[in-house]
Amino acid sequence: MKIVGKSVPHESARGHVTGEALYTDDLLLRFPGALHAWPVVAPHAHALVRALDPSAALSEPGVVTILTGDDVPGEGDTGANRHDEPLFPAEVTYHSQPVAWVLGETLDAAQRGARRVSVEYEPLAAILTIDDAILAGSFHSPPLRMARGDVSVIESSQLSFEGELRIGGQEHFYLETQCAIAWLDESGGIAAHSSTQHPAETQEVIARVLGIPRNRVTVECLRMGGAFGGKEVQANPWAAIAALGASKTGRPVRVRLTRALDFALTGKRHPFQVRYAAGFTRDGQLEGVRIALYSDGGWSLDLSEPVLSRAMFHCDNAYLLPAAELTGLICRTHKTSQTAFRGFGGPQGMLAIEEILDQAARRLGLRPELVRERNFYREGDTTHYGQPVKDAGRIETIWRRLMESSRFAGRRNEVDEWNTRHPHLKRGLAITPVKFGISFTAAFFNQGAALVLIYRDGSVQVNHGGTEMGQGLHTKIRQIAAESLGLDPESVRVMSTRTDKIPNTSATAASAGTDLNGAAVADACSTLRSRLTDVAASLFGCDSAAVRFSEGLVFREGEAERAISFAKVCNTAYLQRVPLFAQGYYRTPGIQYNPQTGRGTPFHYFAYGAAVSEVEVDGFTGDYRLLRTDILEDVGDSVSPMVDRGQIEGGFIQGVGWLTLEELIWDAQGRLATAGASTYKLPSWTEVPDTFEVDFMPRAAEAGTIYGSKAVGEPPLMLAISVREAIRDAISAFGTGGPVELESPATPERVFFAVQRARAERELQINTAEADETVAGLLKEAQPR
Ligand code: MTE
Ligand code: HPA
Ligand code: MOS
């Protein structure tokens, strides 16, 4: 019986629903006497800190101490790449930035203390929008560029047009907010529990701030209650504060952001502004594009560079760009530092090309799906950065299959017919593809490691470098280890992620968790299995090649009835002094990219998929309903189909939220006005399509990946573009079928005004037609008889 490929529940499913699964803050109970930390936050988006007086706060009952820059023994900076994130800033660079932290016996005491720290600020002018940043020349880095071919073709194309698209950001809204607990360990080192996607980097930042070597710091992550990229680097400052507090006071310190603080202090998906020019032939063949991407990076660099380059890598989505000139700039604004978020810039880049294709189609009077299809990559094509598009044919295969299974053509006619009968409600239908590059674009991150321990009773502990955030990585790892060792999954325990088990790990990100760590675990297991095979062969007196492992039993091929237990083989191995633990390692082969030339093969492979969505838009309110979505996703040979299905459904709905509901609004002072669930609209059951069909591409085994599987964590998010395009299709039906301007997110308000514009265009056309008729009539009458 195969274990890999079987639908099994998430290993913590029971714990998730019963509340038994422990998260970082649940561990607080184990640290009696822990101090609570609360920040002193600046009431300005940009200001100098002139003076800070903690004396009143220190007299507040229950306040233990205050952390300021003076307490930092090492470097007071938590910036992950560039060291540009002072922990105790002399210059405030975003609204509500912490300038000091109060430690109290209780949270209440810390909060009271924080209110009584008196800080003198000198407010400065703040840059709060991409437009202002462009005007002021406020950028984090020099422009990134990618180019191929001669884009001057745009000007001579049969259809040539320019446009602009504004794309909103997105709050991660992980259910578990940022959290860390740190304490002094038994030998004077620092230990921390942290809700982090990147324990090794959290360890590095703690060591940096405390000025101690990394071997004195241990970071552990049990699991996260969601992360979505928001804990790739942004878990670090809170862990650093907890560690600094523990080191100063000798007591455990807990930092947990409330939802309001988490909204105010942590970075989000990057808002983008896109300016483009495109040239097409009359029949919708793309000839060239010029795209300028401006991302809103916020106050510090964070991951904005790789996010922007991933956006530029995905300005093609599934389409061949024969000539392309892409530039990217990261705006430096006085806002939260925007960071990784599921898709990591890919969604914004893909939205740009989907916008361009839809604009072209409606200008040419062609069906958008036809224009999309005409521009697909074909076998043998390369991307604009020079990577061959392996399995490009899958794009069209998926497209055709999905068109058929969703009955696209028939429904297209039904929708058109339905629309003629409904003046105030219109339906829209759209199909969009996804091609998403898998691998960290910085090649060195693409490594995974494992340490697998087998005990004499045959039970197994698996340690690996990845973190669990709900995505089911540990479930897949367990299946992989069980399969490789011929055990039931119940015999395999996946341990929490710890820096003292696996060093120098990469973040669990880029959807590569299973690809990297799963392969490393399989490597360790194969070492162990071959050692155990030799032991068993000697027990059976047979050749190693004849030894079989299955379901906790070991036997000589053809003699299953004389099987012995895996445990017995393990104990025998121990007695024969054969080591029962092994490391495993994996590095992704064949990837490289040169940012100077904009050329290379940054991705190990591409994940493909497509979605068809149908919506109904109410012309009176701009409100819409998602009637039906059909998805076909290429996950290779799925390691864990139920987990993958969850990722596809969840990713898609999260994308629907980003593109249609979730809107971040900063006020004129640079304060986030939408800083809670009451003002920031998240998708919920209402947004789940009435009919939701999710399917995997069959017989899709990928060569050179763990058990032929493909990454699934991020790619499905971008399937939600089909919903945006379906909404646009419906809006267009209120008008003349011509182009529709639609900023993102397509909130009911924006849809309402877009419907108004579409209707106005129709009126204009009708009036013009009437006028033409009248003029024609008059002219006829005026003819001499
Ligand atoms: N799924 C859940 N439930 N929670 C999460 O936080 N993060 C997403 C995705 N799916 C996330 C999730 C992101 S941003 C990434 S990169 C991948 O999971 C990371 O995990 P993987 O590499 O194991 O797929
Ligand atoms: N994807 C996700 N996270 C990352 C990447 C990437 O390409 N690079 C660095 N962190
Ligand atoms: Mo995911 S944005 O790569 O953490």
Image (tube, rainbow, N blue to C red):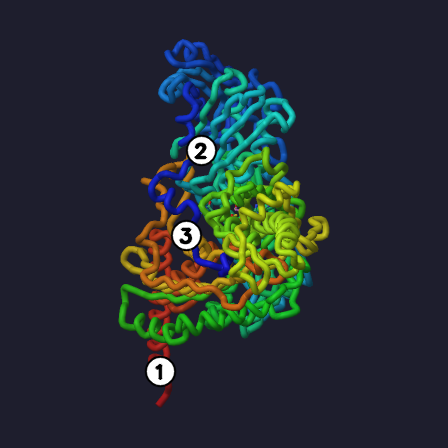
Q: Nearer the viewer, residue 431 or 739?
A: 431
Residue 661 position in % (x across, y down): 37, 50
Residue 222 x %, y %: 48, 37
Q: Secondary structure at mark 2?
A: helix
Tell me the quarter of the picture where residue 409 sits.
bottom left
- Mark 3–mark 2 Cα distance, whole angstroms, equals 23 Å
Residue occupied by mark 1: 782
Q: Earlier in the sequence, mark 3 or mark 2?
A: 3
Identify the residue at horizontal 28%, vertical 55% (top origin). 621
Provide residue 196's location: percent of width, then percent of height: 51, 37
Reading the image, the residue beneath label 2 is 24
Could you say which disc has been placed on residue 9 in the image?
Answer: 3
Q: Specify the amino acid type for callout 1.
A: Ala
Q: Quadrant where the C terminus lies?
A: bottom left
Q: Where in the figure is residue 208, as x and y percent of width and height?
A: 62, 26
Which of the two marks, 2 or 1, is nearer to us in this view?
2
Q: Nearer the viewer, mark 3 or mark 1?
A: 3
The front one of 605 and 168 is 605
Q: Identity of the amino acid at label 3?
A: Pro
Position of residue 454 relative to residue 181, above or below, is below
